[in-house]
Image (spheres, rainbow, N blue to C red):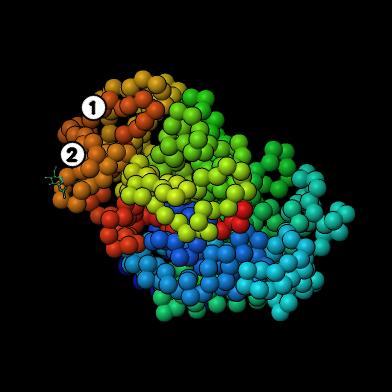
Amino acid sequence: MQSLALLLALAATLGSVNATHFKRLRGVHLGTAKRVIVQMFGWNWDSYGFVSRLSVVDGLQPVSYTLTSKRGNRQQFQNRLAWFTACHNAGVGVIADTIWNHMTGMDSGTGVAGSSFTHYVYPGTYQYQDFHHCGLTSNDDISDYSNRAQVQTCELVNLADLATDTEYVRGRLAQLDASKRTALHPLRPEMVLTSIHRHRRRRPLQTLSADFPGKPYITQEVIFGSGEPVTPNEYTGNGDVQEFRYTSTIKDAFLNGNIAALQNLDNRGWVSGTSANVFVANHDTERGDSSLNINSPRNSFILGTIFSLAHPYGTPTVLSGFTFTNSDDGAPNNGAGTCSTTGGSGGWRCEHRYVAFSGMVRFRNAAGSNALSNWYSPSQDRIAFGRGSAAFVAINNRDDAWSYTFQTALPAGSYCDAITGKPNGSGGCTGAVYTVSSSGTFTASVYPRSAVALYNDSNIALCDNQGQSYALRSAAMAVTETAAER
Ligand SMILES: *[C@@H]1O[C@H](CO)[C@@H](O)[C@H](O)[C@H]1NC(C)=O
Ligand SMILES: CC(=O)N[C@H]1CO[C@H](CO)[C@@H](O)[C@@H]1O
């Protein structure tokens, strides 16, 4: 609660917020030392135990600014407020996934809330002049990614591109932000980390931070394209940028064995780690071949995710998805999500409950802002590294066990392995236990295609969305639900 009080104090003293302040505030809000996002893909607002986004869009393609969408209505949203509050009190933020810069790509239709629209007319909200009309291609869609003007002013796959550089549109967006905060009240408006901003290579929203005094966490989808003039680095002034080169590099490293090359990720010309939002897979890439996914061979998806949560580069998002046969299959059971204790059920995968993933969120909390340390890699498919005196991981991406005595900077003691268990609440551990000597060493036999992860944090707050027997309980997660209508 200390950090929250600090945030409010800062907010009160800042009249107009410049980009630097904004970043710092965001850091305070999510907690610089504990930022992991879980993307609850496809979950509706009534889903067991989870709030989904508070959102005014129908999926990734907004058609109206009401609180009703496929995810549920306002009442269903408000039903989740108790959980919001419980999580909030435990230090877990909720990110409402909102799209600020475009409306739908459909030429006409009726939204779930009953609003009808055509491509550039959303009665009562937007009209023709509130959209960009680039006039550079026959249908105003981007056709040439080597053309900066097209990329930044034309439409991406027909998505009607809001003229976010106009007073009117910016005013509407600010109202939208305010209305969501009101809906959350008496909850706690300050807990709403509004808005995943799917920027899609559009021009920056120059004064976004000033327009949205709620200090939303912003992550922008600006996919790097080799040789293209518009680059992800141009967008870091708005907030975080999704670094897709990370995603493909993780895939390549874990499938082809060269994980030793992953030591330094901040010297590759990517978005700097402090501005990067990274993931092993998101809801789009898991349906294509540009990332690992749950079906990738040799446990590579699990190991890649363990790496992602252990390595300091970027703010990691963990996708919690559902099984599908065709890439446009919708979520099971109309979006009513269900999990088992440490995994999914009813077609939901619930990766956020996997023992290794929730354990690694604890690890990341414990690691805090400690830099990578004690790197050791005897071969390109085995790596071990620490995060100062707070945490240490060894990853074995090979088919034979890795027996070794690792040098760490951990204090002497017994540690509960984050990959196989968690503290049992009375000083024990539900998984493997390793003993670190007074000189900081421990001996392990790391199973094939597996990992060992130790961390020292006696102080991790818990968020239990059901009040009991829920496996995740990680204070570090900001829960977001990316609403894609598939
Ligand atoms: C936790 O582990 C300790 C040490 O193994 C054990 O004594 C204790 O009974 C366990 N507690 C629970 C609740 O399982
Ligand atoms: C297992 C272990 O070494 N735990 C240590 C973690 O750090 C605290 C201080 O923050 C020590 O008191 C514990 O002994």
Could you tell whether 171 is left or right of 72 in the image? Answer: right
In 3D space, how far apart are the residues under numbered discs 1 and 2 (Cα atoms)?
12 Å
Looking at the picture, tell me which residue is in the foreground, 340 or 96. 340
Q: Secondary structure at mark 2?
A: strand
State the residue at coordinates (43%, 24%): 381
Q: Secondary structure at mark 1?
A: strand
Q: Residue at label 2?
A: 414
Could you tell whether 316 is left or right of 200 in the image? Answer: left
State the residue at coordinates (53%, 43%): 281
**Which of the image's four quarters has the N terminus?**
bottom left
Q: Residue at label 1?
A: 443
Q: Amino acid at mark 2?
A: Ser
- Find out whether the residues at labels 1 and 2 contact each other: C-beta distance under 8 Å: no
Disc 2, ligand 2: is the CB inside 8 Å?
yes
State the residue at coordinates (66%, 73%): 114
State the residue at coordinates (41%, 79%): 186
Q: Amino acid at mark 1?
A: Thr
Q: Is residue 56 above or below residue 436?
A: below
Residue 7 x, y percent position in the rendering: 41, 69
